[in-house]
Amino acid sequence: MSTDKIVMQTEDLKVSFPVRRAGHSTTVQAVRGVDITLRAGETLGLVGESGSGKSTLARALMRLIPSEGTVKLDGRDVSGLKPGAFRKERKRIQMVFQDPYSSLNPSLTVGASIAEPLKVHTKLSAAERAERISEVLALVGLNADYADRYPDEFSGGQRQRVAIARAIVLNPEILVCDEAVSALDVSTQNQVINLLEELRDKIGLSYLFISHDLAVVRHISDYVAVMYLGEIVEEGPVDRIFGAAAHPYTQVLLNAVPVPDPVAQRATTKLLLRGDIPDPTNPPSGCAFHQRCPFAMEICAQKAPPKVEIPGGGVAKCHLHTSGPVLAGRAISSLTEAGTETGIGAAYDGTPKSTLPAVAVSGNLESSL
């Protein structure tokens, strides 16, 4: 159960990398001015295409790579802390990585891997560490005697449980899950997702859950942020995002999910993109998405869109809500199918529907999820 207490917040977070191309130095802008807020007991889902900057953002939050901007934990700015000072804060935010096969040291027993954070951050005795290891193994559904085994003796799902046990052994407030279930088969994914939900309710964790699987994000998240080319282009409550997407890119992601029913799939009109993903060393002017957006206007190439509050909760960065063909919250009929009332800016009443021009979206958004 999420609360109003903010446990993590970023303000204008930026990450850039120097690269050399054709003998010239340039910069990749991987994360560009990201603002996110995570509340206690909440799961914030982060979605976007590969290369959109999701994992880079996660590593910046963990201070694994240099960044600019502000990161706050429980209201305290930790972005400027020196490594020694941040070490005290690190136990409050831990990470579960994508690949359970490479995130565990094959030369260490499971117990030794889980004990490492305890050795670094606590003064527990060997007996106390062993007791704590048994506790967290039980929490993730593994037997205590597994502590003496090596990673190659476990399945992928069991290894990811071990990785989760290692991440929670210090009783963190926040767990950053970077594609934590994408390397697992579907049945094992469900088990790990259920485990994460149980841990959230049992020990009060908050999650930043990064995934390209929209069905998984919809199931586990309370709030969703959509990332494109290093920016958050839309965010909002999970039901509003999946029921009434306010940004064209969000709708593209939703339309990319296959429809199980072949008849419904053939009846679906897809939202088509133009061109390729822009070069991150030279991002487009104005709206980062305008070169691929089927609804792009002249202003989209000239000016970055502001954040606009969306009915149903959250915000979107899109000129269609401020300078587009919108009248009193309803789309002008030239952009909608005959008889269709839903349009960009339409009020969200809780019923799943697209908030984009109906000519370009699937006929049944709910069935595609």
Image (cartoon, grey):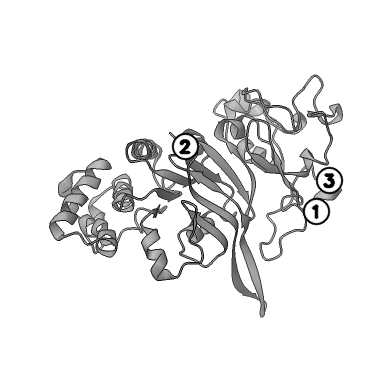
Left or right: residue 246 compared with residue 154: right
Quarter of the figure with the C terminus: top right
For the view shown, which residue lies furthest in the left direction? 127
Depth order, front residue of 186/212: 212
Measure the alpha-carbon separation of dots 2 and 1. Answer: 36 Å
Q: Nearer the viewer, mark 2 or mark 1?
A: 2
Query: Which corner quadrant holds the N terminus?
Result: top left
Q: Which mark is residue 3?
A: 2
Question: Could you tell me the amino acid type at mark 3?
Answer: Met
Whichever of labels 3 and 2 marks the residue nearer the N terminus, that label is 2
Q: Position of residue 128 (x, y in %)?
A: 16, 55
**Element under label 3?**
loop
At x 20% / y 50%, what residue is drawn? 132
User: Callout 2 environment at 10 Å: few (<14), some (14 to 19), or many (20+)?
Assistant: few
Instruction: Indicate the amino acid at tag 2.
Output: Thr
Numbered tag placed on residue 297 in the rendering? 3
Which residue is more in the foreground, 213 or 326?
A: 326
Q: Position of residue 307 (x, y in %)?
A: 70, 45
Q: Amino acid at mark 1?
A: Lys
Looking at the image, residue 160 sits to the left or right of residue 231; the answer is: left
**Disc 3/disc 1 C-alpha distance (Å):** 11 Å
Compared to residue 112, the image places residue 138 above or below, namely above
Residue drawn 51% across and 42% down? 45
> In the rendered image, is residue 217 in sight?
yes
Residue located beneath label 1 in the image: 303
